[in-house]
């Protein structure tokens, strides 16, 4: 049921406020219908402000100002600026803010948030810690789950797959007071405990069971997700999966159990589950936030997601056409007199038959105004340095296409001394055909 611009009442989750990158959130009712803003009721707006002011960072980039800015506009009042982090924040009251990427769908137009979520999940599946199978399943549920519930569902699907393959067992050391002797008799404890019960034996013995660190961590995660999820399907899956962990004790010391996890050939099925268990149990592995105002958040920097997705698609298309594709190549530095200083690291380097082409991805919105189209001067300096150090006259900046720039004539910048920087607009909603088109353009320019 639509309550007002960007705010919905979901059947299972309570209020869900949906915004996109670069949106501006306000609580001034005079601007409720203004398309430049996303209106939020005063109670939820104040809770959001309190959350942002109370954040303390965990991790390299977990800073409030990275994903949302707070400002003031005359006549409008307080404004929260959404930046380029995508995901979901749930505040203490249960109020949820879902941030979706800004994606252009061209002539077809944008067909609701479901289509955007499916494209985002496809982009996210290119990152090394994620698996295509779970993302394919999740994309089919994008119309009835928010992003946080989708990630919970993917974790549960992975556990389900593990259970089908069989939980790992191991010999676990333990002590027992038995009516028969097995294992090693612990003499000191036997004398202390069984002095008056000579019919009993206090022994140390190894048992072959499933109560190993990896399974304890997964059970603890399932119990945590049982409290976090508000989705009926996820709740049902958690209950069903917990049955298979009936003989496993839930981890109580996460750090200790994680330190015991060793991923090898026999435990490779646990690798992704362990990474995601760290996210859900310990707020580690993905940019998450904590502070004086209780909340949960699962947020992804779109620069990293976009860079990974483009690199994946470039490899898929260009490798079969004889190009060597080097990602995050760092063989050169800007200065070398006193060792390597100011390392250069273009996102992608293409090499074929003595030809080198530099590609760099930028998740920024270009504008069809001015001579520079909104490209930063620093980015151009960076491209010029790449060109000179790699002796590569061809440099391409890969920006996501938006409605304003779609169909724009080719854009190029000549340095006058042998460097040419060209722009290619990446259509993330139609990536397969788009990369084929880009490959043809490079062939034509050879």
Image (cartoon, grey):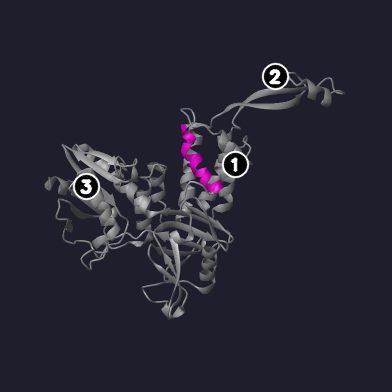
Is any part of residue 267 visible from this angle? yes
Quadrant of the image occupied by residue 181? top right
Q: Position of residue 86 (x, y in %)?
A: 41, 57
Residue 275 sits inside the magenta stretch: yes
* Secondary structure state at the residue bearing disc 1: helix
Q: Is residue 244 in view from this perspective?
A: no
**Viewer-nearest of labels 2 and 1?**
1
- The magenta segment: 268-282
Residue with the mark numbered 3? 388
The residue at the point 49 percent across, 59 percent down is: 89
Q: Choose between 273 and 179: the one closer to the eye.
A: 273
Question: Quadrant where the N terminus lies?
Answer: bottom left
Badge 3: how crowded within 10 Å, few (<14), some, or many (20+)?
few
Marks 3/2: CA distance?
A: 71 Å
* Position of residue 207 in the picture relative to residue 9 (left or right): right
Labels 1 and 3 touching (C-beta < 8 A):
no
Query: Which numbered mark, 3 or 2, is in the foreground of this view?
Result: 3
Residue drawn at x 46%, y 32% is 268
Left or right, 434 with respect to 127, comes to: left
Q: Residue furthest front?
A: 337
Q: Which residue is mark 1?
A: 254
Secondary structure under tag 2 reads loop
On screen, residue 74 above or below 199: below
For residue 84: magenta? no
Q: Secondary structure at mark 3?
A: helix
Q: Which of label 1 and label 3 is nearer to you?
A: 3
> Which sits earlier in the primary sequence, circle 3 or circle 2?
2
Residue 159 picture location, percent across and down? 50, 40
Q: Give the residue number, with chain letter if any, for mark 2.
A: 183
Q: Residues within 10 Å of mark 1 (few under 14, many from 20)?
A: some
Work out whether mark 2 precedes mark 1 in sequence or the reverse, and give the earlier one.
2
């Amino acid at each position: 049921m639509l309550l007002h611009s960007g705010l919905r009442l979901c059947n299972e989750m309570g209020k869900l406020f949906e915004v996109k990158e670069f949106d501006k959130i306000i609580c001034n009712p005079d601007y409720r219908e203004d398309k430049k803003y996303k209106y939020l009721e005063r109670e939820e707006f104040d809770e959001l402000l309190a959350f942002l002011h109370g954040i303390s960072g965990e991790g390299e980039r977990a800073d409030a100002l990275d994903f949302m800015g707070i400002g003031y506009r005359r006549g409008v009042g307080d404004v929260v600026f959404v930046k380029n982090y995508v995901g979901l924040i749930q505040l203490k009251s249960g109020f949820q803010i879902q941030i979706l990427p800004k994606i252009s769908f061209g002539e077809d137009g944008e067909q609701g948030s479901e289509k955007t979520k499916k494209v985002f999940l496809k982009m996210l599946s290119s990152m090394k810690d994620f698996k295509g199978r779970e993302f394919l399943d999740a994309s089919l549920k994008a119309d009835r789950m928010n992003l946080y519930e989708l990630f919970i569902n993917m974790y549960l699907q992975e556990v389900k797959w593990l259970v089908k393959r069989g939980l790992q067992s191991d010999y676990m050391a333990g002590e027992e007071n038995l009516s028969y002797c097995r294992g090693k008799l612990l003499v000191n404890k036997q004398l202390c405990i069984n002095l008056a019960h000579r019919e009993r034996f206090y022994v140390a013995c190894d048992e072959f069971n499933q109560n190993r660190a990896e399974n304890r961590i997964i059970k603890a995660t399932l119990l945590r997700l049982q409290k976090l999820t508000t989705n009926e399907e996820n709740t049902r899956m958690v209950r069903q999966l917990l049955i298979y962990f009936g003989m496993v004790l839930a981890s109580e010391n996460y750090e200790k159990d994680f330190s015991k996890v060793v991923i090898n050939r026999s435990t490779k099925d646990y690798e992704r589950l362990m990474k995601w268990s760290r996210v859900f149990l310990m707020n580690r592995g993905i940019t998450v936030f904590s502070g004086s105002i209780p909340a949960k958040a699962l947020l992804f920097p779109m620069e990293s997601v976009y860079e990974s997705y483009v690199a994946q698609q470039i490899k898929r298309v260009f490798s079969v056409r004889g190009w060597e594709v080097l990602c995050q190549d760092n063989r050169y530095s800007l200065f070398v007199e006193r060792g390597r200083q100011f390392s250069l690291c273009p996102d992608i380097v293409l090499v074929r038959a003595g030809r080198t082409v530099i590609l760099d991805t930028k998740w920024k919105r270009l504008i069809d105004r001015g001579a520079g189209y909104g490209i930063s001067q620093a980015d151009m300096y960076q491209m010029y340095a790449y060109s000179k150090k790699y002796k590569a006259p061809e440099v391409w900046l890969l920006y996501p296409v938006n409605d304003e720039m779609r169909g724009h004539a080719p854009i190029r910048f000549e340095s006058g001394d042998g460097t040419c920087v060209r722009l290619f607009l990446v259509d993330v909603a139609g990536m397969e055909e788009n990369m084929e088109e880009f490959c043809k353009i490079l062939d034509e320019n050879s």
